Image: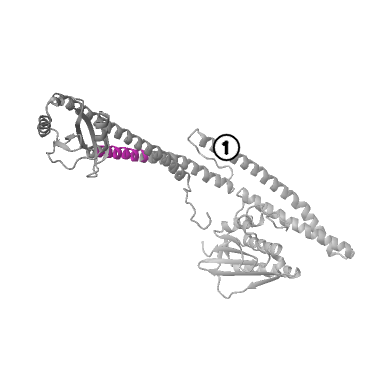
């Protein structure tokens, strides 16, 4: 809802399962608790009412022989019976005349004001036994009363015999039953939550293992297998992923073998084309138009040679054959050589390469100088290709807190935000229209990581792309 707080929902499978299960269990459980409590209440009140009806009937039958006496003798008989009533601590016995006045009570001759409950008038008017369950109009206490008419020998209703009891004990029993049922519901809910949690955890553990392996496969670790000890849906899922992993691994091997074989086959004719093009350009026998064509052939041959070298490096990375020749090297000197060498080429293309020199001493670090030069060249080449329209590239190298940090920034259009996480993936070219294989940055990142460092790309403030290489100063 706009402007309101967003509803928070369980974000895990375990949370969703437990919440959904507990909602169902608690809803059904509460319905059962209310049902059991209602049935027990109805049963308890019905039993108490039946008992009081039976008492009223038997007592009325007992007094039937006294109904032939005169009124005075009858009332004296009622008073005597009420005074001798044995269950006065649980029930109150009342004799009430036709006008609603208490004639005698087991609680004493003056047991309070005349009762105002409706069942007394109903018993007189209908000449039948009538119950009442509710609050006493005088005291506000919940009571159950049963009134039975007393009919004189001439057929006149001269009053009612009334039993009254408080429902406090019955209500307490009903409350205890409800409390016990609620406690049982809580125990069941806890048991369901614990058992459900253990069950879901067993599933989530298997899913977590499958997810981890699937992520590794997605990251390029083709061929790994997921171990599953269950022959269920999860086991079938693991088996399907294993088959997929094996198939991808086989296809990757075929692809790598093909690229490696093709690259080696291409190097021989490219070497010949390059060599003969340079030979022809060194002579004076070509007219200007032909020289221009040969230079184009030479440039394209060199570009193809670079692509072949990149493909060979990629295949070495894929099958783990790329190795480093580590030695103590002056990385600043290597970097400056590349900057000055590549800067002259960029100048001819109208791009200014600015090197931010620093007098800060930079220690020699263990690295493979050849591979690091390859990384620097590739990053500078990408900056010229994709950010060359900015006509400016900045490069720097410095020591920062135990790291040697190389930064290369162009002032081009930058990289779309949605493509930033993908640009270092192999064969990914994104929306760029610049020609290339899409493996240069993947190879560079692998080389940097083999040195224990990191390579990051980000859009720089003010435009352009910033590439940062961090290498440990000591290993």
- Is 77 rendered above or below residue 114? above
- Here the colouring is one colour
User: Residue under circle 1?
Assistant: 240
Residue 373 inside the magenta-drawn segment: no
**Which residue is farthest bottom?**
359
Say which of 326 and 380 sits in front: 380
- Is 217 rendered above or below residue 158? below
Say which of 371 and 182 sits in front: 182
Q: Quadrant of residue 252?
A: top right
Q: Which residues are magenta?
A: 171-189
Say which of 409 and 132 sits in front: 132
Q: Is residue 17 left or right of residue 248?
A: left
Q: Is residue 381 left or right of residue 44?
A: right
Other-residue count near label 1 (Cα within 10 Å), few / some / many at <14 / 14–19 / ≥20 = few
Residue 27: % across, % down:
40, 39
Residue 176 inside the magenta-drawn segment: yes
User: Going 59% across and 63% down the picture, which residue do you hit?
Assistant: 469
Label count reads 1
Residue 114 in view in this figure: yes
Q: Secondary structure at mark 1?
A: helix
Residue 250: % across, % down:
63, 41
**Which residue is farthest front?**
154
- Is 154 rendered above or below residue 38? above
Q: Is residue 412 left or right of residue 152?
A: right
Residue 11: % across, % down:
48, 48
Q: Quadrant of residue 75?
A: top left
Q: Assign the magenta stretch its main secondary structure.
A: helix
Residue 378: % across, % down:
67, 61
Q: Quadrant of residue 78?
A: top left
Residue 325 in view in this figure: no
């Amino acid at each position: 809802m706009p402007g309101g707080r967003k509803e928070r929902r369980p974000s895990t499978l375990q949370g969703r399962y437990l919440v959904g299960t507990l909602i169902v269990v608690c809803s059904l459980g509460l319905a059962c608790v209310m049902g059991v409590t209602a049935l027990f209440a109805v049963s308890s009140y019905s039993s108490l009412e039946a008992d009081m009806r039976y008492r009223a009937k038997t007592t009325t039958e007992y007094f039937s022989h006294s109904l032939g006496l005169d009124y005075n003798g009858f009332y004296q008989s009622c008073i005597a019976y009420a005074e001798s009533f044995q269950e006065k601590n649980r029930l109150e016995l009342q004799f009430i005349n036709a006008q609603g006045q208490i004639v005698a009570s087991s609680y004493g001759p003056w047991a309070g004001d005349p009762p105002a409950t409706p069942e007394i008038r109903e018993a007189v008017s209908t000449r039948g036994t009538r119950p009442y369950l509710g609050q006493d109009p005088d005291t506000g206490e919940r009571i159950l009363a049963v009134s039975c008419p007393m009919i004189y020998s001439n057929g006149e209703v001269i009053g009612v015999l009334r039993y009254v009891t408080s429902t406090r004990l019955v209500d307490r029993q009903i409350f205890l039953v409800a409390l016990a049922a609620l406690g049982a519901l809580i125990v069941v809910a806890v048991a369901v939550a614990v058992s459900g949690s253990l069950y879901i955890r067993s599933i989530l553990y298997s899913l977590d293992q499958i997810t981890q392996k699937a992520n590794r496969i997605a990251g390029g670790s083709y061929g790994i297998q997921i171990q599953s000890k269950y022959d269920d849906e999860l086991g079938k899922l693991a088996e399907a992923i294993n088959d997929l992993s094996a198939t991808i691994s086989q296809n990757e091997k075929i692809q790598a073998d093909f690229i490696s074989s093709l690259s080696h086959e291409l190097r021989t004719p490219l070497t010949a084309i390059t060599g003969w093009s340079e030979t022809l350009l060194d002579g004076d026998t070509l007219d200007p138009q032909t020289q221009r064509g040969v230079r184009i052939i030479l440039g394209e041959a060199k570009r193809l040679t670079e692509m072949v070298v990149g493909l060979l490096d990629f295949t070495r990375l894929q099958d783990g054959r790329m190795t480093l020749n580590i030695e103590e090297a002056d990385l600043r000197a290597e970097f400056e050589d590349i900057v000055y060498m590549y800067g002259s080429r960029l100048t001819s293309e109208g791009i200014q390469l600015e090197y931010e020199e620093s007098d800060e001493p930079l220690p020699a670090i263990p690295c493979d100088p050849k591979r690091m030069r390859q990384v620097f060249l590739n990053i500078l080449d990408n900056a010229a290709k994709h950010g060359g329209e900015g006509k400016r590239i900045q490069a720097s190298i410095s020591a920062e807190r135990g790291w040697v940090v190389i930064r290369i920034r162009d002032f081009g259009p930058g990289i779309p935000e949605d493509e930033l996480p993908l640009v270092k993936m192999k064969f990914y070219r994104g929306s760029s229209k610049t020609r290339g294989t899409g493996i240069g940055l993947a190879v560079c990142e692998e080389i940097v990581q083999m040195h224990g460092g990191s390579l990051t790309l980000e859009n720089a403030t003010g435009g352009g792309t910033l590439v940062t290489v961090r290498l440990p100063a000591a290993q």
